[in-house]
Amino acid sequence: MGGPVGRSSMPGEETRSRVRRGDRLGGEEARGDARDTEGGDASASGERGRRAEGHRRGASAGGRGRSGRRAPRGKRRVLRWSASVLAVLILATGGAGYLYYEHLNGNIKKGDLTLGDKQMADHKANAAGQTPLNILLIGSDARDSKANQKLGGAKETFGGTPLADVQMLLHLSADRSNLSVISMPRDTMLKMPKCTAPDGEVFPASTRDVQTNESLGRGGPGCTVATWYELTGIRIDHFMMIDFAGVVSMADAIGGVPVCVDANIHSRSADGKGSGLKLEKGTTSIKGEQALQWLRTRYGFEDNTDLGRAKAQHMYMNSMVRELRKGTKLTDPAKLMNLAEAATEALTVDKGLDTVKKLYDLAEEFKKVPTKRITMSTMPNVYGTGVNSGRVYPKAGDAEQLFRMVRDDVPLDGKASKRKKPEEPKDPSAPVGEIAVSVRNGTATDALGPASGRAGEVADQLKNAGFGRTSIDSDNVTGAARTGILYPSADLEGDAQAVAKALGVPLAQVKRSTDVSGISLAVGADWREDGTYPVSKGTEKTPESAGALNGDDEKACMKVNPNYTW
């Protein structure tokens, strides 16, 4: 991944000195987090230990700078999202005239978009024929150098596989009127899909709950993409994986970003946990070391978990965009060149986004969205119990509702968008009485068993609607996060869509699959209770549990944990 930012032949000495200063910042938070989060995670640590050899493959997939050094773990973990957004905004702000195309193109590292077996579904166009863009931002974590090991601590994790500790999906609407962001907590427990690494190594689908950040160690960022698609059904167009190199210089060049806390805060505990952030109650303009500390702070915000940290990142991100949009930042060409150098050194992208020109074009698309139409959110979740206490699971119903809105290009801010209904199938449906449908109970979740009798209840709904050839597949109770209908060939597409229409299931959840021999309906965890399908047409409200934050909200203020005030 990213090594030293500047080069002797390029105007980067100022950048290098800033990165070196940043490398020394806040080592205690890195050590504290290693013990208290990843370092103390038995499942993640065990997985790392079992895959020590796989670490080198994963690290290679993540990318390295020429020196082979990585930036301190604690800082990288929570800053990659900001580096990715900054990279996009910087390239757009600077324009083509300031970019050394060939040199910067050589800085950018590339990887396969997806390593999973499932082909991602195509986008549905809006009324104007436009399609949305989904970019997955990934932040990696590794213990592959003496410097990182010294700063990160947690010796039991040395030599382990890298982790995708920051995962954030950016959804740019088809009409470019709005931007929706979903953060997935790194402690989310789920099952991983089968992934095939670029070198041919196969990582079988997991049979147990696995922490989502382990996806990166299963061949690279393409497995993180495959894991998101498996859970959400959202087509991912690109990924951007970010390393720490250049982030300090970016924060300095942007200048102050105003943030707010509702009480005095000092993120430092008696046993060394915390980022060191110390602010007075109210609004403070932060940059450099303080910006770094804000983005890394877990101990001191809300309940001292990654959920609070994600909210703080959302606040900073919105405020940063507002500052950039004022047009008073990044006017110095020398700083801009350093930023472009740092940004491209920091990026690993999919092969479809592998040049400065493509990044610039993407930035131009992002610039079309006004701040008032930016919505930050976190995947609705519930805490696990027993051995998984402290870990989180997607919240049945709410999480699927949020994913569905993104799949269907519904703005999270509640304002209307121009969309068109899915196209009718070219093959018309047969009379409903002739359509054979197999219904199975897939309502089981990682925390709950199957809801009793759901396959029979939905089968009865179909029979009442005239689908007389409906049967129940009682042998397959594999959990499905959302209700879906699969069909094996094009001649059955119309029949499958007829089933969906009868039940009020969105047509976006009807997919072709070679895994079935006929029309198969899986009643998912989003439909555990009898009645009509809960997210049928007309339900377009963002769940309150997503913690939506509008990009224009200048009054947003982080709640300080009373144990970390002064």
Image: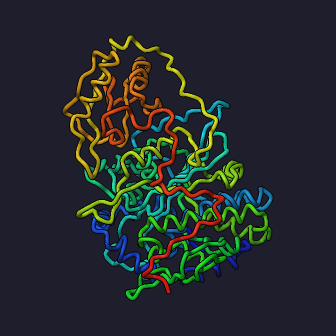
Image side of residue 373 versus residue 146, left or right: right
Residue in the image at 39% along x and 88% along y? 270
Its colouring scheme is rainbow
Where's residue 395, x and y in %? 37, 51
Residue in the image at 33% along x and 60% along y? 383
Residue in the image at 60% along x and 64% along y? 317
* Quarter-of-image position of residue 323: bottom right
Where's residue 420, x and y in %? 59, 29
Q: Residue furthest left?
A: 475
Image side of residue 485 versus residue 95, left or right: left
Could you tell me how many numbered marks the image carries?
0
* Quarter-of-image position of residue 466: top left
Q: Is residue 146 visible?
A: no
- In the image, residue 402 sits, relative to residue 255, either above or below, namely above
Where's residue 517, x and y in %? 30, 24
* Quarter-of-image position of residue 51: bottom left
Q: 68 or 220, which lies in front?
A: 220
